[in-house]
Amino acid sequence: MSDAHTPRRRIWQEALILAFVLGEVLLAVIANMADPEPSTPLWRFGLVIALGVALLARHRHWRWLLPVILVLNAAGMSISVLVFATYFYATWARSRGHVAAIGILAALSGASPVPIFTRGDMIGPLSTLAVTVLVVAVTLATGMYTSTHRALMSELRQRAEEAQTGRAAAEEAARRAERTHIAREMHDIVAHKISLVAMHAGALEVNPNLDREQVQASAGLIRETATTALNELREVLGVLRSDTDEKAPLAPQPTWDDVRRLVVTSQEAGLSVDLFDFIDDPVPDSLARTAYRVVQEGLTNIHKHALHTKARVALIGEPGTDLVIEVSNVLPKGFTTTLPGARMGLSGIETRVTHAGGTITSGPTDDGRFEVKAVIPWPTTT
């Protein structure tokens, strides 16, 4: 039986047991020597001391050792040995039947007519039995209370540890979710704008014969796009530095007009992209934000991986049905299905669309195009 006490406390407990047993034996020896006719043989004193020492081995062998100690204690009748053996068994036993059995055994062994501290003829057998039963009952009750208290404290500690572990896991999950949220917003903000800047700069690089007005126009677009990206990044960093616990958007939230403006901006940057807009009804802001990210990611990947191909954006739907968003382009020569640098953004919009209750697919089509298609429920406004 393992002990939950610290080593120092356990040492003090063992010393206390020996002190009680030896103290009882010493008092009994003194009383026996003061009696003109000693009634207790010396071997009984030695037996009680041996039983007290045997109690020190109770931790590993308590199931059989403590009952044996109680049986042998009937020959010496030490109150200390009786109380300690009964208490420890009641503390560690898990079965009430075993506790009741040890109580009966303790009462029978304690009713022995040969106690070491009193002469057998000083009190009657019935009185001895009554006192012993009372002592055993109090000892059993104390042991069972200690057992229940320890079990309760152990359960409370376990619950506290589980709660702490669960709280730590929840905090870690929240941190991971927030990091993912920040990374997705940063990608949405930076990738599209930087791809436009790169495309404008590339146009200047490959067209050295542009006149001054064309160069100024392209430089202005680069400056405007870079400034917009920097402003949005500053707003993101401002939210990250904020001490408020309220979860605010990390950047200005787009509207449905911004979805159309994405296509116009890409056209101005030199991308050959057509817009097929069949939306006549007002689009809810939450749905518009999701659509914006889908179109933005699709055009960003076209900018990065299929700049000189023909592209198109189709927007179809009405309230009460689905909003269908298709962004596709003709597959460039040497196309492979693994697009370096595209998976983070696609993963981000997959999360957004799924969270909105929709579905999204991406990949090559039978007519030689690469298509990103999202289908999102469009609830009817009330």
Image (spheres, grey):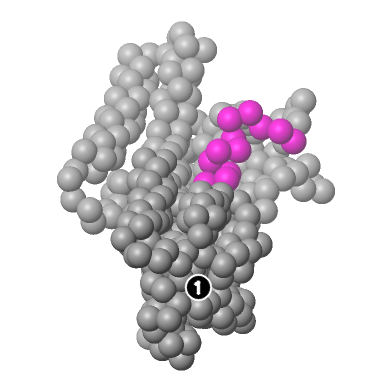
Q: Which residues are magenta?
A: 337-350
In this view, the residue in front, 377 or 277, is 377
Q: Position of residue 376 (x, y in %)?
A: 55, 66
Q: x, y (%) of residue 348? A: 52, 47
Q: Position of residue 344 (x, y in %)?
A: 55, 38
Q: Is residue 375 visible?
A: no
Farthest residue to the right: give it: 366
Q: Locate the C terminus by quadrant.
A: bottom left
Please give the name of the residue rendered at 38% of the width and 14% of the height, measured from the top-left corner: 211
Quadrant of res 21: bottom left
Choose between 268 and 358: the one closer to the eye: 358
Comparing 150 with 100, the one in front is 100
Residue ranking furthest to the front:
36
Amino acid of disc 1: Val
> Residue at 28% across / 30% down in the picture?
230
Front-most of residues 294 and 358:
358
| Residue marked by disc 1 | 114
Q: Residues within 10 Å of mark 1 (few under 14, many from 20)?
A: some
Pick out the residue farthest to the top.
Answer: 208
Residue 115 lies in the magenta-colored region: no
Helix or strand or loop: what does disc 1 sit on?
A: loop
Q: Quadrant of the N terminus?
A: bottom right
Question: Residue 59: x and y, percent?
Answer: 55, 52
Left or right of residue 168: residue 34: left
The residue at 63%/28% (across/down) is 340
